[in-house]
Amino acid sequence: MAQSSKRVTVHCDVCDGPVEIEVTHEDLSKQADGILRVMLAHGKPLHAIIVYIDKNFRIRGIEQSDSFQMDTNRDVSVVAATDVAETLTEALGEPCFQALYAFDDVKEREATAFVLDKTILRTVCDSGTICISELRRKIAFLEKALGDKIDLDQIEQVCEKYVREGLIRRA
Amino acid sequence: MSFFRFRRRRDPARNYLNKMAIGLGAGLVKARDAILNPDFGPQGAMDVLATWMGQEIAKELLTQKKISPSSTSEEVLEKLLEEVRIAEDLSIDFDGEKANISVQNCLICPRRVGGYDLEGHTACPVGGIIRGAIGLVKGKTPKLDRIDLKTGELCQVDFTLSG
C-alpha cells in the first residue's frame, strides 16, 4: 500500500458486512468541497453503495442504491463520483452544510446571536460538513434546555441565514 | 418576640414576578447541563433561562385573559411588552411576517440599570422572553434573525413571527 493512501473499512447495509476501500490523498485533495465520493460495487449478487469520505479519511455518509443495473454491452469503466452526485445534499437527499470558517474566527461576530443559532453554527464549524439530520441529532440537547421541539425547518432556516451571510455553504 | 403574617392580596400585575421566578427555576433545572457548558457563555445561559421565563409569562397572560390561544403573534408581543416593562422606550416595526424591536433605555439591563460591569459580556433576556412567549401561545417558535445588543444603548432584535 502506498504511503499516500489509506484503507478504509465501511459497513454495507445491503450485504450486512464490512467492505474495504483504498483511498488516496491525491483523490481527496482533488475534491473542491473536501468530500470524496466512492461508488463501490461489490458482493454476490453484485450491488453498489456510495461512500462519502472527508479529508481526514472519516466516513461522512453511505448511500445504497435501490437497484443495480449494468449495461452488459459496454466495457466496465470507472465513473467519476461527481457524475453520480454533484453535491452531498443531492447524494444524501437532505440538506448538507459545510463550514467556511473555524468557529473561533466568527465567535466574536456572533457574540449576541441567539443560543440556538450560535449552537447550530458551532456544530457546523466543528463538523466541517454535516447533513441536517445529523445536525439536529447533535443539537437535540437544546430541546430540553429550551423546553420546546426544534424541528428540521427551524434548523434549515438558521443554516440558510448563515449561508446568506457567507459563514457556511450548502455541501 | 414579634409576629408577622403576610396574606396575599389579589394583584395580578404582580404575578409576573412570581412567574418569572418559576420559569427561572424550571429553566435552571432543565437546562443545567447546557448552562454549565462554557461554550454557552452568559448570553447563551440567559437565552435559555429567558425562554422559560417567557413561557411562564405567557401562561400568566393567558390566565389573566390578556391574550387567548387564538391571539396573533403581534398581539402576544404587544401585550407581553405592555405587561412586563422591559424598557422606557420600545418600538416594534412590523413588515409582513418580519418584526424589528428597538429597545432604548432598557429597564432590565444589568449594566445600565444594575450598574454591573459585565466584563465585555451581554446577558439580555429580551430575545429569549419573546421566543418563549410566542412559542408557547402559537405552538411555533419565532425565528430570531438578528440580535444586536449594545448594552445600555440601543438594542435591536429582528425576528420572523411566522417562524
Image (cartoon, rainbow, N blue to C red):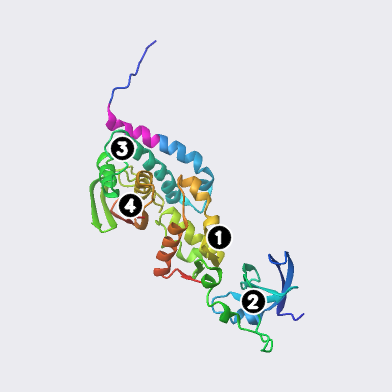
Q: Residues within 10 Å of mark 2 (few under 14, many from 20)?
A: many
Q: In which quarter of the image is residue A39?
A: bottom right
Reading the image, the residue beneath label 2 is A38
Q: Looking at numbered disc 4 in the image, what kind of residue is underneath it?
A: Thr
Q: Looking at numbered disc 1 in the image, what kind of residue is underneath it?
A: Glu
Task: Find numbered disc 4 in the image and state the secondary structure of the residue it sits on.
Answer: loop
| Callout in the foreground (2, 4) | 2
Q: Mark 4 falls within which chain?
A: B
Q: Mark 1 falls within which chain?
A: A
Q: Do circles 3 and 2 both sit on a common chain?
A: no
| Proximity of marks 1 and 4: CB atoms separated by less than 8 Å | no
The verdict on residue A153 being magenta is no
Q: Where is residue A131 in the image (x, y as percent from the top left)?
A: 53, 64
Q: Give the range drawn in magenta.
A: B11-21
Q: Distance between the residues labelled 2 and 4?
A: 52 Å
Reading the image, the residue beneath label 4 is B151
Residue B61 numbered mark, or none: 3
Q: Which residue is drawn at 55% across and 55% down?
A: A137
Reading the image, the residue beneath label 1 is A134
Q: Looking at numbered disc 3 in the image, what kind of residue is underneath it?
A: Leu
